[in-house]
């Protein structure tokens, strides 16, 4: 006999103002159809900064981050047909791939002999992407407001919750490794992460209702 | 919240935050694949976790990286990415000034790094191809897992339907345990007429009808049973359904106002039945 799992009342996935703009899924669909022109360019302008921010946070190296940025967008383009809207918003899908590749690069770096670098840390602002429509000052203001709202939601985390979450999310540490690093029992680490995630989940609901 | 629901909630939250073990992540994936409610939960925690990323500053992504991605898409591999203009880098030397027979040192200095680069490129391509093979295999396995889970859901659905049917049948025959039960036959009025047997419970005014040897039922038709009262037109007793032993089966309550039923008939009707018999396939008096 098959057990049929029932979960009671779980809220259905709601369209997320912070995570999903209506055109995101269309861009992914266009890339899945093989569009390597305007759809890819718009997708890159939409998510390039976000991805680079995540990768830099994890790798702490601009040059290495740009190498990984290229890998990530190539992978996103290649895997666009596999994107499943039911499982993740486009933003979360992009962030997940970015985080995974950056953590892979970080692990690979730790295996490289000392002194061997992936690239120099020199930035050339003159070669930055031309500002697309989404980077106009008014759009930037909205993006900035949105970021501030997200930061306000994160500010509700206790310092212990934030620390544990950041070690898991940005450092890629397992719960046991976090427990070792912080000198805490494994159960305490899990409890902090769990409590932090619930805070974020509540914050997410508030953001969807209030962010433009 | 049930204990099971609480456990799934915790698993989904821990997996979204990162740091969960492989088996924990696999369990979440399997649960999400099988249940849309878990999928919704995983999606919501995924969005919640990505707030960590959305709070970060967003530097401007360089156009050269986009160019490099496009080049890779065309099947070309960029030589080195990112290409960074270094202020104070090596001076540009005009080609003309370097003409002339290169010295052995220069040849070695050029050939050795080129050979090393070629070897490195070969190894890199080899590793990349291996990685792509693994990704393909993984995609194949994921597909198989999806298919297996789809079949499990179908099987579970079929099991539930079968259980319901069994309960219906058991309910239909519950009343058979009565000493007043009568077995009747609808007497054939034509040669080769299908056999119709009726279990009759006069006290509860119920019939169970089993009809054998009816012609195969076309997909756009139904067999309909009719009560034949002593006087007046046939009264519909409802549609028959496929029963045991290739029979057609019906469990019917006799309408309270219907008296003196003398016989029964079965007709072939358009899907859903008709108010009056159209094509009678069997019928006759009850004996």
Image (cartoon, rainbow, N blue to C red):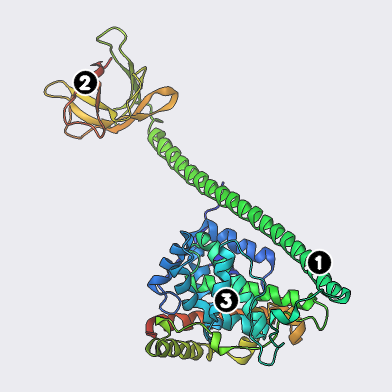
Disc with the residue nearer the chain's start (2 vs 1)? 1
Please state which of residues B131 and B48 is positioned toward the viewer in this rendering.
B131
Mark 1 Cα within 10 Å, few/some/many (few <14, many 20+)? few
The residue singled out by tag 1 in the image is B115
Element at label 2? strand
Mark 3 Cα within 10 Å, few/some/many (few <14, many 20+)? many
User: Is residue B217 visible in the rendered structure shown here?
Assistant: yes
The percent position of residue B163, horizontal first and vertical second, equals 47, 42
Disc with the residue nearer the chain's start (1 vs 3)? 3
Determine contact: label 3, label 2, CB under 8 Å: no
In the rendering, which numbered label is found on residue B279? 2
Marks 1 and 3, how far apart in space?
27 Å
Q: Quadrant of residue A126?
A: bottom right
Disc with the residue nearer the chain's start (3 vs 2)? 3
Please state which of residues B147 and A62 is positioned toward the viewer in this rendering.
A62
The residue singled out by tag 3 in the image is B65
| Above or below, B174 relative to B279 | below
């Amino acid at each position: 006999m098959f057990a049929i799992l029932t979960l009671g009342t779980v809220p259905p996935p709601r369209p997320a103002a912070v995570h999903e703009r209506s055109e995101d899924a269309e861009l992914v669909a266009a890339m899945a159809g093989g569009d390597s022109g305007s759809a890819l360019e718009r997708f890159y302008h939409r998510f390039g900064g976000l991805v680079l921010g995540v990768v830099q946070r994890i790798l702490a190296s601009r040059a290495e981050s740009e190498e990984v940025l290229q890998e990530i967008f190539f992978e996103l383009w290649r895997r666009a047909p596999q994107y499943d809207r039911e499982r993740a918003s486009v933003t979360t899908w992009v962030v997940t791939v970015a985080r995974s590749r950056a953590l892979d690069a970080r692990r690979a770096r730790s295996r490289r002999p000392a002194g061997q670098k992936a690239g120099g840390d020199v930035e050339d602002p003159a070669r930055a992407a031309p500002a697309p429509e989404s980077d106009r000052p008014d759009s930037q203001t909205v993006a900035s407001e949105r970021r501030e709202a997200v930061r306000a939601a994160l500010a509700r985390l206790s310092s212990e919750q934030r620390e544990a979450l950041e070690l898991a999310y940005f450092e890629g540490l397992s719960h046991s490794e976090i427990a070792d690093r912080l000198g805490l029992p494994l159960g305490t680490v899990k409890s902090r992460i769990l409590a932090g995630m619930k805070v974020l989940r509540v914050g997410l609901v508030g953001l969807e209702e209030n962010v433009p | 919240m049930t204990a099971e629901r609480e456990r799934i909630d915790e698993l989904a939250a821990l997996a979204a935050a990162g740091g969960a073990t492989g088996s924990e992540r696999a369990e979440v994936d399997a649960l999400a694949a099988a249940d849309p409610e878990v999928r919704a939960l995983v999606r919501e925690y995924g969005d919640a976790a990505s707030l960590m990323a959305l709070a970060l500053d967003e530097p401007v992504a360089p156009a050269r990286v986009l160019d490099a991605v496009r080049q890779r898409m065309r099947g070309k591999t960029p030589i080195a990415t990112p290409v960074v203009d270094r202020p104070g880098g090596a001076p540009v030397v005009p080609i003309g000034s370097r003409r002339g027979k290169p010295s052995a040192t220069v040849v070695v200095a050029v050939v050795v790094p080129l050979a090393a680069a070629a070897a490195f490129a070969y190894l890199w391509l080899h590793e990349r191809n291996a990685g792509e093979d693994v990704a393909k295999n993984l995609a194949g396995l994921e597909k198989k897992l999806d298919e297996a889970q789809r079949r499990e859901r179908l099987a579970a659905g079929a099991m539930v339907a079968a259980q319901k049917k069994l309960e219906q049948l058991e309910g239909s025959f519950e009343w058979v345990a009565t000493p007043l039960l009568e077995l009747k036959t609808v007497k054939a009025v034509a040669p080769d007429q299908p056999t119709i047997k009726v279990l009759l419970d006069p006290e509860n005014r119920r019939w169970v009808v089993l009809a054998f040897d009816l012609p195969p039922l076309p997909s756009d038709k139904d067999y309909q049973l009719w009560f034949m009262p002593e006087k007046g037109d046939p009264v519909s007793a409802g549609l028959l359904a496929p029963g045991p032993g290739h029979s057609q089966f019906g469990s019917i309550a006799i309408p309270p106002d219907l008296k003196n039923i003398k016989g029964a008939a079965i007709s072939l009707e358009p899907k859903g039945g008709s108010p009056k018999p159209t094509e009678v396939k069997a019928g006759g008096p009850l004996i």
